[in-house]
Image (spheres, grey):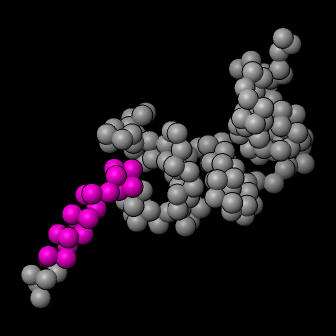
Amino acid sequence: MVALRERRRLQRIERNSKKPFVDRLQDEVEDQQDAFLLDPGMGPMTYITADGRVLFDDRSFDDRSFDGEALREATDDEAIAALVVGAKKTGINALLELIPVQPLHSLECPACTGGRWTSLPGYQRDAEFVCFLCRGRGWADQAMLDKAAALGTWPPRET
């Protein structure tokens, strides 16, 4: 009986070793973190866990990290943007319900007019990005506007 279990364990390891590296990473994170892949991404793979955390897996194809960390919890802005992207890619619009509602002291985002997505001048018409100002919230408060102004990203410059 022990020999049979060991043979099955070795067969499982062999099957997994034939999977592409990113598939093994996905299985590892989903199993260990009780998570669901939101976006395989052009950058970090993004997950949401059963307890509502958003995780970024910054490992590249050769198991090194893009920024020095492998698996990390997203910042608030990153998490909101990931939920917006995840809703679009998975079709699970209920993910948008996890984004904070618009506070009374805020206004509809002037960059995306509340739509969460924006395009940039000079890009294809259908190339959309999560709004750089509200990070997908659909609203902005004065602190967000001030931060964007300090960075020179808002208001748009006349060209």
The answer to whether residue 122 is visible is yes
- The image quadrant that residue 142 belongs to is top right
Instruction: Confirm whether the magenta stretch covers residue 10.
Output: yes
In the picture provided, is 142 more to the left or to the right than 132? right
In the picture provided, is 11 more to the left or to the right than 87? left
Residue occupying image coordinates x 73% and y 61% = 93
Outermost residue on the left side: it is 3
- The image quadrant that residue 150 belongs to is top right
Q: Quadrant of the C terminus?
A: top right
In the picture provided, is 92 more to the left or to the right than 3? right
Estimate the x, y position of residue 103 in percent, counting from the top left.
85, 49
Estimate the x, y position of residue 24 in percent, counting from the top left.
35, 56
Estimate the x, y position of residue 7 in percent, counting from the top left.
14, 76
Residue occupying image coordinates x 78% and y 44% = 116
Estimate the x, y position of residue 94 in percent, counting from the top left.
72, 64
Outermost residue on the bottom side: it is 1
Residue occupying image coordinates x 43% and y 33% = 67
Residue situated in front as seen by the camera: 13 or 101: 13
Instruction: Confirm whether the magenta stretch covers residue 7.
Output: yes
Residue situated in front as seen by the camera: 118 or 142: 118
Residue situated in front as seen by the camera: 37 or 74: 37
In the picture provided, is 130 more to the left or to the right than 48? right
Number of numbered discs overlaid on the protein picture = 0
Residue situated in front as seen by the camera: 108 or 63: 63
- In this rendering, the answer to whether 88 lies above or below 6 is above
Outermost residue on the top side: it is 159
Residue occupying image coordinates x 19% and y 76% = 8
Residues in magenta?
Answer: 6-24
